[in-house]
Amino acid sequence: MRHMDPAKLPEALRPFVALYEKWGAVGSDTARYALYDRAVSDPAEIAELKDWHAKLSLIDSASYEDWRNGPISPLDENYERAKVYFTDLLLYGELEIHKR
């Protein structure tokens, strides 16, 4: 299993590497949907994600926005960005964690 290289992330996002590793399904939509199901079926997982959202919200997104908006493919070259992208898709697009 491949692991993220924290040095390839903006400094502001480095404290969250473990969560990106856990929630960033880059392999397939099916894997991301399985994470969605896992989150909504377990209050402890939702609590973890809400806490993460609260902490991430305290960071000025301008400090990493340009990096985050860069390419996610090819995956070999942009693995860390892809993990962040697909985590954001899960959290904010599908789970709408900011509304929970």
Image: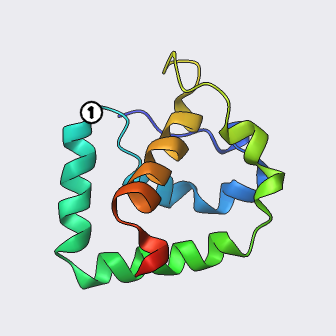
Residues 84 and 100: in front is 100
Q: Is residue 81 left or right of residue 7?
A: left
Q: Is residue 43 left or right of residue 21?
A: left
- Residue 86 occupies which quadrant of the picture? top left
- Residue 41 occupies which quadrant of the picture? bottom left
* Mark 1 crowdedness (10 Å alpha carbons): few <14, some 14-19, many ≥20: few
In what quadrant of the picture does the C terminus appear? bottom left
- Residue 43 occupies which quadrant of the picture? bottom left
Residue 85, how many percent across, how many down? Answer: 52, 42
Kind of residue at disc 1: Ser
Q: Is residue 36 left or right of residue 19?
A: left
Q: Residue at image x 82%, y 54%? A: 62
Q: Residue at image x 63%, y 76%? A: 55
Q: Residue at image x 35%, y 43%? A: 25
Above or below: residue 5 compared with residue 88: above
Above or below: residue 87 compared with residue 73: below
Count of numbered labels shown in the rendering:
1
Residue at numbered disc 1: 28
In what quadrant of the picture does the N terminus appear? top left
Residues 1 and 36: in front is 36
Q: In this view, does 18 lie to the left or right of 44?
A: right
Q: How is the image coloured?
A: rainbow
Residue 7, how many percent across, how many down? Answer: 72, 40
Residue 34, how many percent across, how many down? Answer: 18, 52
Considering the numbered disc 1 on the image, is that residue within a helix, a strand or a loop? loop
Residue 10, how many percent across, how many down? Answer: 76, 46
Q: Residue at image x 20%, y 65%? A: 38
